[in-house]
Image: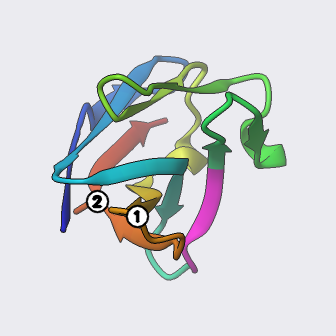
Amino acid sequence: QVELVESGGGLVQAGGSLRLSCAASGSTFRVYVMGWFRQAPGKQRELVARISRGGTTHYADSVKGRFTISRDNAKNTVYLQMNSLEFEDTAVYYCKIEVTHGGYSKLVDYWGQGTQVTVSS
């Protein structure tokens, strides 16, 4: 089993910045893709950004040039630096990781508990 702990959400004015963190802990697991999703009220959860174990990144068009995803493999932690925040970025942000356990090759998904990001206009 893997536990994810998110931090860094909060209230910020438009144009401001926030940095989200998501740390994974547990035993006998290896982390592959790590990502951030968000869900605004009344909307479906959507991918914000993801990063492979080797550092290849992918971003939603709406955040390109403003958000940066990074990871520390030694700490099993993923970060999301959010700059130039807009009102439309208001949502609950969730981290998601894909892991294998022990010597098994099957990928298992784990989700964080979510952290609220509110951008005031």
Callout in the foreground (2, 1): 1
* Residue 20 sits inside the magenta stretch: no
**Would residue 22 be found to the left or right of residue 87 on screen?**
left
Q: Is residue 46 above or below residue 66?
A: below
Q: Identify the element where label 1 is drawn.
A: loop
Instruction: Residue 107 in the image: state x and y as whole percent.
Output: 52, 71
Label tally: 2
Q: Which mark is residue 112?
A: 2
Q: Which mark is residue 103?
A: 1
Q: Which mark is residue 90?
A: none
**Between discs 2 and 1, the one toward the N terminus:** 1
Instruction: Residue 117 in the image: state x and y as whole percent.
Output: 35, 44
Q: Is residue 16 above or below residue 94?
A: above
Is residue 67 in view from this perspective?
A: yes
The reply to whether discs 2 and 1 touch (Cβ–Cβ < 8 Å) is no
Q: Which residue is pictured at 27% across the width and 51% down the height?
A: 115
Q: Which residue is pictured at 75% across the width and 42% down the height?
A: 59
**Would residue 23 be found to the left or right of residue 42 on screen?**
left
Decide which of 81, 110 is in the foreground and name it.
110
Q: Which residues are magenta?
A: 44-48
Q: Quadrant of the N terminus?
A: bottom left
Is residue 34 in view from this perspective?
A: no
Q: Is residue 41 above or below residue 15?
A: below
Instruction: Residue 89 in the image: state x and y as whole percent.
Output: 55, 46
Please, what is the three-letter code of the amino acid marked with disc 2? Gly
Please, what is the three-letter code of the amino acid marked with disc 1? Gly
**Would residue 68 be found to the left or right of residue 38 on screen?**
right
Q: Identify the element where label 2 is drawn.
A: loop
Q: Residues within 10 Å of mark 1 (few under 14, many from 20)?
A: few
